[in-house]
Image (cartoon, rainbow, N blue to C red):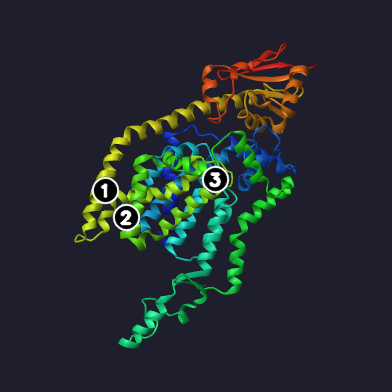
Amino acid sequence: MPPSLRKWLTPAAWVAAVTAVLLIVFPVGFPNYDTIYALVWGRELAHGVSPDYGAALPPTPHPLTDLIGLVTSPFGEAPITVIMILAYVSLGLIAYLVYRLGTVWFDKWVGILAAVIVLTRAPFLSNGLRAYVDLPYIALCLGALYIEARKPRAGWPVLALLVPAGLLRPEAWGFAIAYWLWLTFDLRRASSATHSSASGAQTGTPPGSTGRKPDHMTGFRPINTAFGWEVGWRGERGTRELAWLGLLALGGLILWVLFDAVTTGNPLYSLTGTQETVESLKRQTGPVDLVLYGPRRLGEVMQWPGMIGGFGGLLLGICLLRRRSALGFAAVVLALLAFAVLAAAGLAIIARYTMLAGAILSIFFALALLGWRFVDRGNPWRLRWQVFAGIVLLMTLIWLPNQWDLDRQVHTDLTNQGKIENDLSALVDEGAFSPECGPIAVPNHRAVPRLAFGLDVKPTDIVSASEAVSGEEKEKLEEIERRGGYWVQPASEFVIHNYILDPNDKTNFKGLEPPAGFHQVAGNESWLIYSRCGG
């Protein structure tokens, strides 16, 4: 087999194998609330109209996901199929890229163990198999990191992955800008050249011989000196190249702002809309909550053995294996810093926003267990590392039953919620709703995008009864009660227990009985449909 073909076939086979195992073990993945909304909005864009953001508690729009909905909208149910294929493949890609990063930085055993760790973390499985945008975003960021690990300062290939990542999550904007700064500037100790010149005069060593190339060979041009450090142009790229790379680094930010401006007239809609939703759902946000809850959210991803092993491995790696660990250390710092900045800016402090840092920390978790092998036998830190590895291994073994329960709960939740989602879609497919009858009331906002997608209607044509307490939503609900339409009701306690979208959702399903005059027209194990057509 030609090497060029093997270069692509090997990772493709690896990802396909992991994806197949995921499909066997977790066959009931389904698109979540946010992603279904993106498919609805993409279809509206395909029809040449602006996305309908007016329903109760709309999620943050993500331009790239909306684009997928736009492209696939002519093909019926194809958008859901495409998005679920992307979800499973993204998980496989994340595992592969974690494996490759662990291999490049350390060795294949660290890489393999890190991939196993990622694929057994419940938040990766739960969010990934619900097709959250965070998983393809993480895959794109890890891909950019892998390119940089293989070829330092690779330039545009890294930014080319961070641009689409920046159309899924805003953190990638900061990564792209930080990477451009890394390509453009260098930071050095200001005293090194002076010391080396004095040393060269006394010993005959050529001036500037400090273990690196002299400035006239690297193109380094000092700009400013402060606190013993010197900042300068790196000089490896010309001004024109840096200019277009800078434009590329801003590509995700520019395209997202333009998307908001064109579709809503407000270039900051995604920010302000998300802040309003966070406030409505009373989620933790802001600097104080960041300190109180941020570590807990990362802990939900890594669990306690992972937190101790991940940060312990990171510290040991940067102290004892600095050159191997430097890029990973920088990536963890940037990922956590981006999470902190967005949380302080008013976005929610939730576990899935820490999963990129968790993926990279998984490599250092594996390093905590296996990294002592890279320390010389005569170094006293080899034994100390072995002791630490033994402690982390013991913690991991003790925690193993809990981890098994967490992963099993993911399987149970996916199965239960997938059945409820599928039963709702089945009623749509069976023609339980007639457009002539009138608008639809649903028990909570989770059902809105699923019905809007299946019935090809606007989300604002469907009323969430639990949110209709005032304003326009209340007026719509009162109109359904007065003039007729459809009323969707849970059919069992099973649905009531499993169809809560958010922990802060205080929906009281039992208090949302069909209005007088409505009679049952359809139903199944999960849902009952009531109707009164005509005034």
Total marks placed: 3
- Circle 1 residues within 10 Å: few <14, some 14–19, many ≥20: some
Query: Which sits in the foreground, 22 or 348?
Result: 348
Q: Can residue 437 be seen?
A: no
Q: Which mark is on residue 316?
A: 2
Of callouts 2 and 3, which one flags the residue occurring earlier in the amino acid sequence? 2
Near-viewer residue (535 or 353): 353
Q: Closer to the observer: label 2 or label 3? A: 3
- Callouts 2 and 1 close, C-beta under 8 Å: yes
Q: Quadrant of residue 333?
A: bottom left
Give the numbered dot on residue 388: 1
Q: Is residue 359 above or below residue 502?
A: below
From what the image shows, is residue 2 above or below residue 365?
below
Judging from the image, what secondary structure is the residue with disc 1 in? helix
Q: Is residue 86 visible?
A: yes
| Label 2 to label 3: alpha-carbon separation | 29 Å
Q: Residue at x 58, y 71 (%)?
A: 241
Foreground: disc 3 or disc 1: 3
- Residue at numbered disc 3: 343
How far from the left and from the top, in percent, is residue 116? 36, 44
What is the distance, in whole Å, between disc 3 and disc 1 at their CAs? 33 Å
The disc labelled 3 sits on which kind of residue? Ala
Count neighbours of disc 3 (C-alpha within 10 A) and say few if under 14, some if 14 to 19, many if 20 or more: many
Circle 2: residue type: Leu
Residue 306 location (% of width, % of height): 36, 43
Q: Residue at x 75, y 18 (%)?
A: 484
Residue type (three-letter) at the residue carrying disc 1: Phe
The quarter of the picture where the C terminus appears is top right
Q: Quadrant of residue 318?
A: bottom left
Query: Going 48% across and 30% down the picture, which residue do you hit?
Result: 414
